[in-house]
Image (spheres, coloured by chain):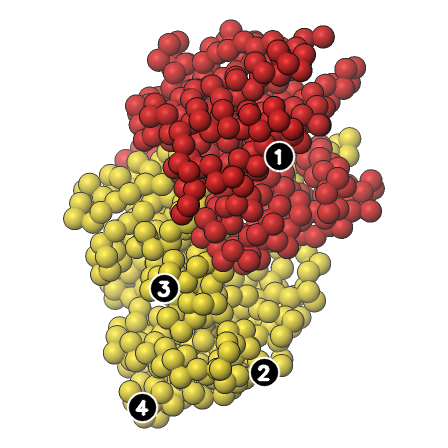
Chain colours: A yellow, B red
């Protein structure tokens, strides 16, 4: 049976990074009989330029039909003043919402070869391996009302609404506990229950879900501001962190930066398993952005995009061995001192996007 | 004319820390003719134990009437399950709201003697001096609806509302630009305009305020998640940061932790100048919490509370020389290697709360 991948390279360095994944897909089809069938579309600024929308209806249909979506990056100064509804980010947000990708998995790992690139003291980040589970289809990102009202007298009012229902908290907590069981079996849930009613509910539902089904997992609660502090102070205290959409946005960026491996970090956004087939809708994307300043120069680091494809192999196709090997290939290339400019170090060999992709592919072949 | 101070020591280590400020006030009255008149009340868990509310009406009246409020800290495990409306934090939130303390000033400075205590590499934090200006009476902290609704079928819905009006953004931006002029003349405004309508309005109003009245100040805009990253990556790039209530809560905690001086950081919460007298309502409090685990042991670090009093001298009473001297006294004591346990270092002399307060007072006297 075919494995259907829909590629959305997007803007900036997205297409260059995606090119390196395409090579790996090609190799896996030829030599490993993987049976990937790929199609490709536009998202973000490039979709706006072509259709006046951040993603076309036709591409949305393809994304909905695919087994997995691989997403590059969106945005750039060219589209800074397009109308709010068609800004590049709108394409990504629509994909998340319409595919119901409620569970965003963001590993913050520190590649040993890069520990010294962190702004933290190396001993605090060496061996760091956190998994942040961010709720991705609820909260202040999508709650209504979300509007700017003209009050007259030159006054306007900007409104956003944070909303969480029990079932939304329950299902993301479930993902966190399940993931924890495959790791160190510890979950830390973060909210601001001392200020937000949605935080009070979050805390209650996580506690009840834990009690009912996952009491074997160690559970801790932390206020999100204290959580930000603790990430900076002693990141290795965490195993799995589960939090809402907005706190997840902030905390996962801080965690990613701590690792010193920002250009290398992947993410997976997953839906619920289908009742009949057990399949989950899924989108995989690098944590980094579109980096318009270096786009088109052939110097972008493709590792986060390739690592996102490794997550795709693992979570969408259960190709565990291949995912492990691809991650190992990345680590091996780094150990050999091959680096793109963003992670350059004394004594390393600096390469461009294509050479980095080639190096990883040839390690992958050798495994 | 008398200078009226209302002291709210609160819970945990609050009373111990406040004791050291009281000594400084006493000295300033006796030897410097400062004319401070102090009164004292209860807030947080201790107010709940006495009156069943997180602050009594009588104490609210006193806070409203005072020239400045000195606030210790609130909360502790003893009150973890009291009803939401009377939880310790409610006292602090009511003070902020009813005194209309919309401008929260949180300096994140790195005391040179403590640079090595940061989890960041010392060269990234040495000499760090950021001022975070956090909007304190709006946003998701106070917007309505704020509630948990029972939807039936075992489902509940938690709702919080983020609301900002033009005038609220204008006045906090004004404070940031004014403060920047006394510093490096640079402001970075942070929001999530790519996701939040309140962020779009925030961005517009800050931009217009800048254009209309403060175009001499350098202004930059940053997405709040990228801002969190940049704080961790290269904190010294910032001078003044202005942001909303919730982002300010998160970002100021991350910034405070970066300095390695968390137990030392003060804050000021200011209202608008009165039309007639020009006076601002004000509350001064340490950034750290009530630290129930070490309360009552005489080992808490009183420096943040004393530094908060220095901010009070500066902003409420225009006693600039005295404020400078008090800050200098703190730095001198640290330079001499006198430390409480939380900031202990090799070769330093460890002291308790009272000794630390005495050491600072005697430096202050000598200046
Ligand atoms: C691009 C933007 C809409 C997005 C978000 O805020 O979720 C990004 O910051 C992320 O974390 O994926
Ligand atoms: C105690 C709590 C309500 C408060 C807040 O969230 O504002 C605290 O975290 C702070 O930053 O002053």
- Which chain is indicated by disc 3? A
Does the CB distance between marks 4 and 2 fall below 8 Å?
no
Q: Residue B350: horizontal and vertical position, in percent?
A: 40, 36
For label 4, the crowd category at 10 Å Cα-Cα, with few meaning under 14, some 14 to 19 and many 20 or more, is: few
Q: Earlier in the sequence, mark 3 or mark 2?
A: 3
The image shows residue B85, relative to residue B206, as above or below, that is: above
Rounded to the nearest angstrom, the CA distance separating label 3 from label 2 is 30 Å
Q: Are marks 3 and 4 on the same chain?
A: yes
Q: Which residue is mark 3?
A: A126
Q: Would you say residue A79 is visible in this rendering?
A: yes
Q: Which residue is mark 1?
A: B328
Q: Secondary structure at mark 4?
A: helix
Q: Is residue A226 left or right of residue A216?
A: right
Q: Residue B181: horizontal and vertical position, in percent?
A: 77, 41
- Which chain is indicated by disc 2? A
- Which chain is indicated by disc 4? A
Q: Which residue is mark 2?
A: A298
Q: Secondary structure at mark 2?
A: loop
* Tag in front: 3 or 1: 1
* Tag in front: 3 or 2: 3
Q: Which residue is mark 4?
A: A366
* Label 2 near ligand 1 (CB < 8 Å): no
């Amino acid at each position: 049976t075919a494995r259907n991948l829909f590629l959305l390279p997007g803007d900036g360095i997205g297409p260059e990074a995606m090119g390196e994944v395409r090579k790996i897909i090609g190799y896996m089809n030829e030599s490993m009989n993987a049976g990937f069938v790929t199609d490709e579309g536009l998202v973000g600024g490039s979709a706006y330029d072509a259709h006046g929308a951040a993603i076309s209806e036709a591409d949305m249909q393809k994304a909905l039909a695919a087994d997995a979506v691989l997403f590059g990056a969106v945005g750039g100064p060219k589209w800074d003043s397009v109308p709010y509804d068609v800004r590049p980010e709108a394409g990504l947000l629509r994909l998340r919402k319409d595919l119901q990708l409620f569970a965003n998995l963001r590993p913050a790992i520190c590649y040993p070869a890069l520990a010294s690139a962190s702004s933290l003291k190396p001993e605090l980040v060496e061996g760091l391996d956190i998994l942040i589970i961010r709720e991705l289809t609820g909260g202040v990102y999508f709650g209504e009302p979300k509007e700017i009202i003209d009050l007259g007298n030159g006054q306007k009012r900007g409104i956003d609404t944070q909303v969480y229902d029990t079932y939304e908290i329950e299902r993301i907590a479930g993902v966190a506990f399940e993931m924890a069981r495959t790791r160190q079996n510890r979950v830390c849930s973060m909210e601001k229950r001392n200020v937000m009613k949605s935080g009070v509910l979050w805390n209650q539902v996580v506690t009840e879900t834990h009690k009912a089904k996952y009491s074997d997992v160690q559970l801790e609660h932390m206020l999100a501001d204290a959580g930000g502090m603790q990430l900076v102070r002693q990141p290795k205290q965490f195993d799995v962190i589960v939090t809402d959409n907005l706190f997840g946005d902030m905390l996962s960026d801080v965690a990613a930066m701590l690792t010193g491996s920002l250009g290398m970090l992947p993410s997976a956004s997953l839906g619920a398993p289908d009742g009949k087939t057990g399949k989950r809708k899924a989108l995989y994307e690098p944590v980094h952005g579109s980096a318009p300043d270096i786009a088109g120069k052939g110097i972008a680091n493709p590792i986060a995009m390739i690592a996102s494809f490794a997550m795709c192999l693992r979570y969408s196709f259960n190709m565990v061995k291949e995912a492990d090997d691809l991650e190992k290939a990345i680590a091996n290339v780094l150990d050999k001192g091959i680096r793109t400019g963003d992670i350059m170090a004394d004594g390393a060999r600096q390469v461009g996007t294509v050479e980095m992709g080639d190096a990883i592919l040839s390690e992958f072949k050798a495994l």
